[in-house]
Amino acid sequence: MNEKKSTPLMHITKRKELPWYKTWTIRLAAILLAFVACAIVTMFLTGDNPVQVYSTMFYGAFGTPRKRWILGQEVAILLCVSLALTPAFRMRFWNLGGEGQILIGGLACAACMILLGDKIPNALLMLLMFVTSVAAGAIWAMIPALCKAKWGTNETLFTLMMNYVATQLVAYYIIIWEVPKGSGKIGIINQNTNAGWLPQVGPSKYFLNILIVAILTIIVYIYMTYSKQGYEIAVVGESENTARYVGIRVERVIVRTLIVSGALCGLAGFLLVAGTNHTITTTIANGRGFTAVMVAWLAKFNPLAMIFSSLLLVFFGQGASEISTVFGLNQSFGDILTGIVLFFIIGCEFFINYQLHFRKSAKKEGV
Amino acid sequence: MDRSSVAVKMRGITKTFGSIVANDKVDLDIRRGEILALLGENGSGKTTLMNMLSGIYYPDSGSIFIDDKEVSISSPREAFRYGIGMIHQHFKLVDVLTAAENIVLGLKEGKKLDLEEAGRKIRKICDTYGFEVDPKQKIYDMSVSQKQTVEIVKVLYRGADILILDEPTAVLTPQETDKLFAVLRNMRNDGKAIVIITHKMHEVEALSDRVAVLRKGAYIGEMMTRETNAQEMTNMMVGRSVSLNIDRPDPVNPKPRIEVKDLTVRSQDGILKLDHVSFTARSGEILGIAGISGSGQKELLESIAGLQPVEEGSISFVDDGGKKTELIGKDPREISSMGVALSFVPEDRLGMGLVGSMDLTDNMMLRSYRKGGMVFADRKSPKALAQKVVDELEVSTPGLSIPVRRLSGGNVQKVLVGREISSAPMVLLTAYAVRGLDINSSYVIYNLLNQQKQRGVSVIYVGEDLDVLLELCDRILVLCGGKVSGIVDGKDAQKNEIGLMMTKIKGGSTDE
């Protein structure tokens, strides 16, 4: 053993708890770095001027009042789905069935509009639409929850499979209700009478959706943070053994929480069909059930922080579609940029928790 | 080789984890041909220091010399190159492989795997030091002490001559401990350097040649074992003088409180865990439960607490008026709503008794959150309770809103016990209440249990340290493979007698 003492090039240690302003400085720096990285990638791959690309993205998201309302509406729906997933995720129940729960909620809503439109008073119709949508979403989430509680089935696969069932159900009813026959789609429901359409409140037709989701955000925040049920959800999520030990009926909590989760997804379906689109298609959920997973994780399941994470993702989505039309790039390029930004945001958490020590040159200490 | 040459010199070793300084400029010498006992309370940095020697952590600053050459140990593989081997508290063996396969695992010697040759080498090591290992036996067929032997042989096989053992006796019976000590002495006489980390003073006195003491990450001093005594060592560890006697006040007016009759429990895989266990726990006394780990202690306590499905038998709670209430078939919530004040300090503190990621207040809430209004949970009284527990039990914590996982083992246990006794229980079940706790924290717990006993609580204390069981408990029930092998009086029982009772009835599986 005659070799010289070699110190490893670097080693990693856990950091002290950083004050909040430092963690936010790190996060901000990460986002700035992400933009630099995106700029380099943009220049390298497309040869376009990155500053122009960014300003186009910004214009695409915030450029006109109409674009701003659309952005708000998109944020609201995505946020609604993220809020729906929150209680389940806090309980470590990986509900990947948001997509299906939205669809089935939307289908229930559309069914009411088509079958009962103009046959019963509008107020009653809307109440019925609301109740059936929420109930449909709840049932759709409750099925995997019951199986998990009773037989310990894997919720990730089960909820995922329920998405396909929901999509096929919607496809089936679209054929039954298609207008005009043979078109393969339903078209705008009750276009002449507007029966079952959510009324316009305030400055835009999207305002009501945004308002509802804003209120919902606060309710979910309070539910998760201060209520007994929210506390039970947290305990079950952290340790089922502890939950049993203090007499929490774990199975009941699982089912109850998933009813809440599914109901809120159903609500998102209701808002999409009755408030925004006035029709139903198999793609009406548009991947939000999955995007919301990311929104919730980025915000560490804090409902208030989800406002920002959903805004970030929607901003990139809207911006990307704008650059794809202006620069003739396809939509995928926007996804690449989103991916880079997410990588930096998630990666910076490492630097918040850990510190790297590099080898100091010529380290000599007394013997 | 020079018999008392210094094998390892550690100088100015500092290691921090975030804001916690685990080791602060520690100097330590480890000599060949000597058994060094490393002493210190929980969180004093013993394991961290040894982990740096065995390549698991890398020091922030300081130097390590092996045979007077400065070295840098950045991985366990390098540690082996320098002849350093560590036997951890939790064994790192592959269950489905044989002893020999585990021992050669990860080694690259020769072109092909030669288990016959390995077997011969293993037998040679065993003969030299007096081990008993069958190279062809599978790990899952082994008792805890056999597994430990495999770990030690594994380290020796790799040519280690500096051995570190982290609390090796925590899981052993007295007889097995004696065997281990004999082997360690043989290795010392062979010129190996041995470091043993332990909390048990009588083991330090029986085994070690020299002791080194750490306190709060700093090196306090060292001395020859024969020139010191348990009292002095303890005072050095704690930093002030402590009394080492455990009180055993006489039970006042004991009355039957918990009657267990013919309790039979099977695990989920159908293995018999408890076999017609019957006993009575009385108010105002501490009933100790002794046994090799995995003899049914966990199932017994969890059956009483309403957490374990029971095959047959009865468990009844007897109140002061003699009225009996059957507990089997009730969950913890139903038991408490029937007015049976039962508290339970489970073995798995962070996995069952507490929620590791929640703070002190939220953990206090576990027992009380159902009280009060309909929708919202009351956080004020749990907060007050958390403060009270922190003050009365001297929990060292930066605040009430820190996740309990970040506290040291002793403080975690104080939080758990503090919460459980705050509800004025009539029955208090404790499983390994002082496992992994240092002397100071252990005595805090013993005192708390004695206070509860004097309040008239029926305390059931599942323990592993027979010396403590004999000093603390009024009666001791000995379990062996799920059966009661006897109940003895704490005052006049002998340690050896209990040790034999723990292994006497050979039925079912007695290992983990």
Image: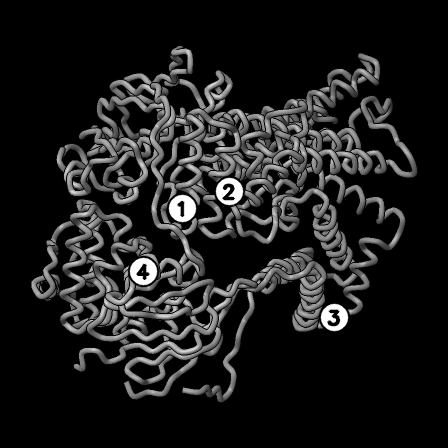
The subunit carrying tag 3 is A
Determine whether the residue tagged by mark 2 lies in a helix, strand or loop.
Answer: helix
Q: In the image, is residue B137 above or below residue A34?
A: above
Q: Which residue is mark 3?
A: A48
Determine whether the residue tagged by mark 4 lies in a helix, strand or loop.
Answer: strand
Q: Nearer the viewer, mark 3 or mark 4?
A: 4
Q: Which three-letter amino acid code belongs to the residue tagged 4?
A: Ile
Task: Measure how far apart labels 4 and 2 are at the Cα level.
Answer: 25 Å
Q: Which residue is mark 4?
A: B197
Q: Which three-letter amino acid code belongs to the residue tagged 3?
A: Asp
The subunit carrying tag 4 is B
User: Residue B415 bears which disc, if any?
Assistant: 2
**Residue A194, quarter of picture:** top right
Task: Measure how far apart labels 2 and 1 are at the Cα level.
Answer: 15 Å
User: Residue B443 bears which disc, if any?
Assistant: 1
Residue shown at 32% from the left, 22% from the top:
B310
Dot 2, how many residues are within 10 Å of its Cα: few (below 14), some (14-19), or many (20+)?
many
Residues marked 3 and 2 touching at CB (< 8 Å): no
Q: In the image, is residue B508 above or below residue A55?
A: above
The subunit carrying tag 1 is B
Give the mark nearer the N terminus: 2 vs 1.
Answer: 2
The subunit carrying tag 2 is B
